[in-house]
Image: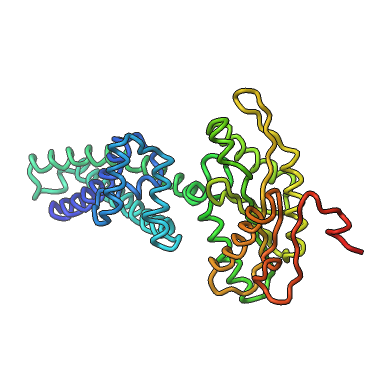
Amino acid sequence: MGKAMSKSYEELNRSQKNAEQAFAFMQRHGLEPNPVAYTLAYEYEKGEDTSLVNEVNRMIVQGSLDDTVTVDLFHTYIENRHNGKALNIIVDRIHPNLERSASILKEQGQNLNKVHQNIEAYPDISKKEALTAISQNESLVSINSELNAEIEKLKSELENAKEMARKDSLTGAKNRLAFNERLNELRKQNNRINTEFSIIILDIDDFKKINDNHGHNTGDQALIRVKEVIEHDVPQSSIYRYGGEEFALLLEGVPESQAVQVAEKAKNALKRTNVRASNDIVLTITASFGVAQYRGESNILEFISNADSALYFSKTEGGKNTITTASSIGLYEHDEFFMSQDDFTDEALNPS
């Protein structure tokens, strides 16, 4: 029985030490104990990805390793290299390991309690061995309690981890990772049942000037307001923080012709939106838009590129505060031109 006890204890000890390395890293750098931070810490301590290790070390030296940077590093060095499935893999691995540890603790605790309560039933165990067993029992009970608390905490964190890893920390909108994942899901669905969907990519006009002239806090407020206004005024779309001053709107079951109308609604809503700078100057927000419909592109990046190209046309040729469709700049054959500007009349946009 002593050998079995020792083997179980060693197995538990190994699992505990593996977890302790990641937990110690998070504690050392003041990181929230969530699965994203845990995964990054584990990969860093493992040391196999030298580029990750070097970048983490650089952040540590700069004193800039915080929860936001941790999420960014997770996306860059772990999530993206596993095609957006790294967190799924971690969840699948952590859960069974935690369950096994809990099971070992429970079984070992029961065995040690039997020894403790029925010493006379084990004549082959000396008093010294019995005392050792009792000591181990007490130690395992303590570890059991601590580890079970960590298990429950991690289980709760794991339930929220996917959402957290796919949300922009500033605006609260879903992020680019979530956007790409949903697009791939819709592409596969389209291949099966030919479901229409379109995207709108919008870019806040003169955002660099807002930051340069009024400070980054004003720029942050502008980003937050754009997200809030789009969510409120364009509820038929799902909004994502695409990067920088860009947002993406995903329209499921909507062709390009109807997506243009949604973009018009968003453009008009933003024109009515103001942001007050720290010097009490009131700034009006406008944005430029690129619209594209999925038409069977084999690579989802090609589809996104069509919307990006339309957006670029709006920024460079349309005079900003403009909507351009992918079809209007010749990316699709046999599509009619569409470009909307403020100085276009309703009659021009909707000829009878």
Q: Position of residue 158 (x, y in %)?
A: 44, 49
Q: Nearer the viewer, residue 116 or 351?
A: 351
- Using the image, determine if residue 259 lies above or below residue 162: below
Q: Is residue 346 visible?
A: yes
Residue 309 as seen in the image, left or right of residue 88: right
Q: Position of residue 139 (x, y in %)?
A: 22, 38
The residue sitting at 64% across, 70% down in the picture is 331
Q: Nearer the viewer, residue 78 or 247?
A: 247
Q: How many marks?
A: 0
Q: Nearer the viewer, residue 125 or 142?
A: 142
Q: Position of residue 292 (x, y in %)?
A: 66, 64
Q: Nearer the viewer, residue 207 or 264?
A: 207
The residue sitting at 19% across, 45% down in the picture is 115
- Using the image, determine if residue 197 lies above or below residue 113: below
The residue sitting at 10% across, 47% down in the picture is 125
Viewport quadrant of the C terminus:
bottom right
Considering every residue shown, the one lying at the far top of the view is 279
Q: Which of the colour schemes (rainbow, by chain, secondary structure, one colour) is used?
A: rainbow
Viewport quadrant of the N terminus:
bottom left
Residue 127 as seen in the image, left or right of residue 29: left
Q: Position of residue 290 (x, y in %)?
A: 66, 58
The residue sitting at 25% across, 50% down in the picture is 15
Q: Is residue 145 visible?
A: no
